[in-house]
Amino acid sequence: IQFMPSAAHIRVHGTDVNTALIQFAKEKFPAVTLKVNDFNPPLSYPDGTFDLIYSFSVFSHLTEEAELNWLDELARIGAKNALYLITVHGDHFINSILPDKKNEIVAKGGFHYQVVHNRTGSEWDFPIGYEASFHTHNNIVEKWSRWFNILEIYNGSSAAEYLWPDAPLSLVKDLST
């Protein structure tokens, strides 16, 4: 939400599986309509609702089956000619943190999922099944073209580039290393 412009004619909606995160966002962004959604589709929006769908740090955590279900759902709620901006752990992440698994990931079709979270029972915990997934560019083009015309795939860099302007410096420093 932090990247969405604040203008009177733009209506911004947000949805997430984590109730605590939605509450945080409601406090930080009171003009945005926010909802908690279930881990699996559908969302409560009618077909063709949105001109822009921005999914940040969702498809970097799903199993392949959940991903395909969510892509189908996002295609449903997107208007004709909607623009989709979707982040993933792509080639940059694979090369940076999984270089020893790159050949294996490519050989298996360019998708890799692994369990990474220890759940503590905190309200900030994500549901079981929300872990870490990685995509090659080829995987995105081959699989996602069923729903979307892939216009561009951008390589990422430091996660610190994506934080809100007043993010704690310790977080920025930790992510930059």
Image (cartoon, helix red, strand yellow):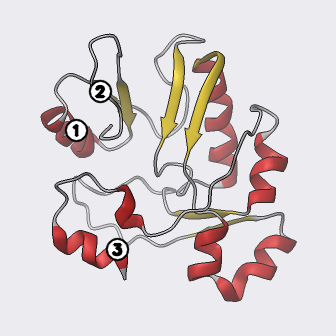
Secondary structure at badge 3 equals helix
Check whether the beta carbons of the residues at disc 1 and disc 2 lie within 8 A of each other. yes
Quarter location, residue 161: bottom left
Q: Name the amino acid type tagged 3.
A: Leu
Q: Name the amino acid type tagged 1.
A: Ala
Q: CA distance from mark 3 to mark 2?
A: 27 Å
Counting residues from the start of the chain, the first of labels 1 and 2 encountered is 1
**Residue at the disc numbered 1:** 25
Task: Name the residue located 18 percent from the left edge and 42 percent from the top edge.
Answer: 24
Q: Position of residue 78 (x, y in %)?
A: 60, 20
Q: Position of residue 109 (x, y in %)?
A: 83, 63
Image side of residue 122 versus residue 47, left or right? left
- Most extreme residue toward the bottom is 100
Counting residues from the start of the chain, the first of labels 3 and 2 encountered is 2
Secondary structure at badge 1 equals helix
Counting residues from the start of the chain, the first of labels 1 and 3 encountered is 1
**Residue at the disc numbered 3:** 175
Image side of residue 148 versus residue 114, left or right? right
Vertical relation: 133 (above or below) 53:
below
Q: In which quadrant is the C terminus drawn?
A: bottom left
Q: CA distance from mark 1 to mark 3?
A: 21 Å
Task: Name the residue located 57 percent from the left edge and 53 percent from the top edge.
Answer: 62
Q: Which mark is residue 34?
A: 2
